[in-house]
Image (spheres, helix red, strand yellow):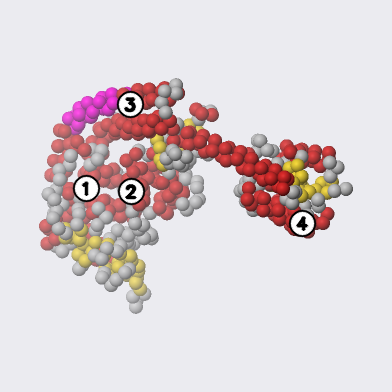
Amino acid sequence: MKKAIIYLRFSSDDQSQHSIERQNMVTTSWANYNKIEVVDTFKDEGISARSFDRPDMKLLMAFVRKNYRNIDYLVVSELTRFSREVGDAINLVKEIQKLYGISIVSASRSCIYDIYDSNSFFMMGLEFLLGNSENIKRQNDINGGIYTAKAIKGRYIGSRAPYGYKKEGEKEHRKLVPDPEKAAIVNYIYDAFLRNTPQYLILERARQFGFKSTGKSEILNILTNPIYSGQIFAKAWKENPGGIFPASHEPIIDMLTWQKVQEKLKEKDRPRITIEDNMPLRGVLKCHCGCLLTGAPSRSETGRYYYYYKCMHSKHNNISAVRAHQQLNDILSLMSLPERIIDVIIDNSAKEWNAKLNKNSAELKAKNNALLQVETQLTSVEEKWINNQMQHDTYNRWHNELTQKRQYLKSQIDTLGKNHKQTFLLLEENLKKLTDIPSLYEKAATLQKQQLLRVQFDNSLYYKDRLYRTPYIMPIFAHNTLILKQKGLLEIDGFLQKPAQVEPGGFLSNSLIDFLSFIATIKAA
């Protein structure tokens, strides 16, 4: 009685059509009908046919090498279960028959293939080719469906919602909806990154807020994922271009913030700096050669430790931390705002606030009208596409353009609709804290101290010849620059513009308002 072994396989994306149960029924039925004894069965479940690197395929080949004298046939339901790569599959079939004398059987076709018979060999190759052709068509259908869902309909089709979102709805109406608690953490991650907080510290803080992921690259993954800005990435398909397309779900991050983060990510990587409370200037203060100063304690002969800031690439600087901190304290004292400047700013802001509200009201009405027109045009384009009155490439071009315009207008409307009264209160409540910047600096945590200095000097503060120097200082703090230079504390390089007045009309873009928003987060120690 002749003997056979059976091989069964299905891939995860082809499971419903070619289940293990169906293959087992087809192969065993052939064996029973032809009175063939099945000595063993091997099966790979959820394994692709793109290579022979499969657990049970390896076991099968090991079994063949050891027992080939007692095996006549290797039975599969279809040859595509064996492999979909035609060249590799034919070579392996030839090897099995030439080396071990075992014939391959396609049970569904009831064919025993013989590589030494020209007609049989041709039919075997034809079955492989037909299976490969079906696989290519199926893959094209899948890729086309994915591209349409993403690039044209803006749908997220992943099995799991990205962090910060949850899924609502059913089938084609299912879409991403922000999860309020997790979305707040995503917002924190973007804001902290733009404030120059190191990613490892962002991760630590996010975990305190409830971020569960343990992966070291998760922060970077969130920062680079266009999903959070209401966009979606789609791979190119045939003649259709790939790239980032407007999505149908609500964004967590506004487009301007997203673009700022992407630009910042393209910048040259900064060296990782260890945060230490005794040396808050490490990672902020630079040497005149352009390198960030590092620092460490030095032990004296008496056993006491003294802290120094040093240039790690040269001997340009070796600064006593005590001296550097005292100088900085004196600088911040002279940068503190006198009451008269604060009174003038608040008075001018109050006078111009109503004018700003009136202007915003008119702009808001115009933007809403423009949005209504764009949405009408978008509906018209979609109707023409549904009624086959527009070609695919034309529809794709118009749909993308109008969707981007709609998102841009919504972003502007959201900006104009913000409560400017809260912004004015922020100005009024926190501006007075700037009358004593040394005290504010002392209350701040180490990371906040660093951010305070980065903003005031635009990341350009450096040290040379026992003196702090900078090419930039926030205009509002530049009222004592001559005194700072005379006292040998701080020197401004080059030409310094005249201190600018605070412009209440630019509340949402004014750097001082952003600075005061940060100041509001500093709590008393």
Q: Amino acid at mark 2?
A: Glu
Side (left or right) of 49 relative to 198: right
Give the class, few, some or many, for how many residues have Cα within 10 Å of label 4's Cα (few <14, many ≥20).
some
Considering every residue shown, the one lying at the far bottom of the view is 301
- The quadrant in which residue 309 appears is bottom left
On residue 434, which mark appears? 1
Residues in magenta?
Answer: 353-372
Check if residue 368 falls in the magenta segment. yes
Q: Is residue 300 above or below residue 503?
A: below
Q: Residue at x 14, y 61 (%)?
A: 485
Say which element carries label 1: helix
- Labels 4 and 1 touching (C-beta < 8 A): no
Q: Nearer the viewer, residue 348 or 243?
A: 243
- Labels 3 and 2 touching (C-beta < 8 A): no
Give the class, few, some or many, for how many residues have Cα within 10 Å of label 3's Cα (few <14, many ≥20).
some
On residue 374, which mark appears? 3
Q: Which label's residue is closer to the chain start, 4 or 3?
A: 4
**Which residue in the structure is indicated by mark 2?**
263
Side (left or right) of 73 relative to 385: right
Check if residue 299 falls in the magenta segment. no
Q: Which label's residue is closer to the chain start, 4 or 2?
A: 4
Q: Amino acid at mark 4?
A: Tyr
- The quadrant in which residue 426 appears is top left
For the residues labelled 3 and 2, the Cα–Cα distance comes to: 29 Å
Q: Is residue 262 visible?
A: yes
For the residues labelled 1 and 3, the Cα–Cα distance comes to: 45 Å
For the residues labelled 4 and 2, the Cα–Cα distance comes to: 61 Å
Say which element carries label 2: helix
Q: Amino acid at mark 1?
A: Leu
Q: Amino acid at mark 3?
A: Val
